[in-house]
Image (cartoon, grey):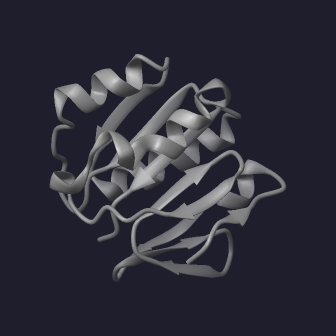
Amino acid sequence: MKFEEAKTQSETSISAYGNGGFRIGEDLRVEGSVLLTPQGYYPWDVTSKEQMSTESFARIIEMSEDLELLILGMGENMAFLKRDLRSHLESHDIGVEVMATGAAARTYNVLLLEGRRVAAALIAV
């Protein structure tokens, strides 16, 4: 998967997830974990919470002025984000909500509908 630019952030809504990937918009299937941003979506090479590092969030940090919140999907089950990673994101004025990927996908869609400046980093399940 490569970067796909979005004309509007609603084009990055998630219509399905599972089987190792996501359906973005009406019919585009992407395999693996994904970053969804106001600019579009990107492949994300994180497959478990143990792989997360400050570098994993570099693209999110780059667009911190355009974001108010990051929804973080930790996989099949909810897991906590390491304190240093949360502090790193919050030091760039990015709020973080951590949950299981399914809940994160649903929350992301609701926030999109509300017109919020939101991004999602979702580990595929």
Image coordinates of residue 29 in percent, x first then y, are: 56, 81
Note whether residue 13 is visible.
Answer: no
Most extreme residue toward the right, as rendered? 7
Q: Is 53 on the left-hand or right-hand side of 12?
A: left
**12 is higher (above) or lower (below) than 23:** above
- Tell me: 67 left or right of 77: right
Image-based side of 97 in relation to 75, left or right? right
Q: Which is nearer the eye, 15 or 67?
A: 67
**Which is more toward the observer, 107 or 123?**
123
> In the depicted view, which residue is nearer to us: 109 or 20?
20
Rendered view: 47 above or below 29: above
Residue lying furthest front: 55
Residue 38 in which image quadrant: top right
Residue 50 seen anywhere in this rendered image of the structure: yes
What's the residue at 21%, 60% (across, down)?
48
Indicate the quadrant containing the C terminus: top left, top right, bottom left or bottom right: bottom left
Residue lying at 20% horizontally and 52% vertically, measured from the top left: 49
Q: x, y (%) of residue 116?
A: 65, 31
The image quadrant of residue 46 is bottom left
Of the 4 image quadrants, the one containing the N terminus is: bottom right
Indicate the position of residue 82 as horizontal and vertical percent values: 17, 34
Q: Residue at 51%, 30% (x, y): give it.
A: 69
Residue at image position (21%, 37%) is 81
| Vertical side of 38 occupied by 30: above or below | below
Q: How many marks?
A: 0
Horizontal side of residue 4 vs 120, given as left or right: right
Instruction: Tell me where residue 61 appears, x and y as whole percent.
Output: 51, 34
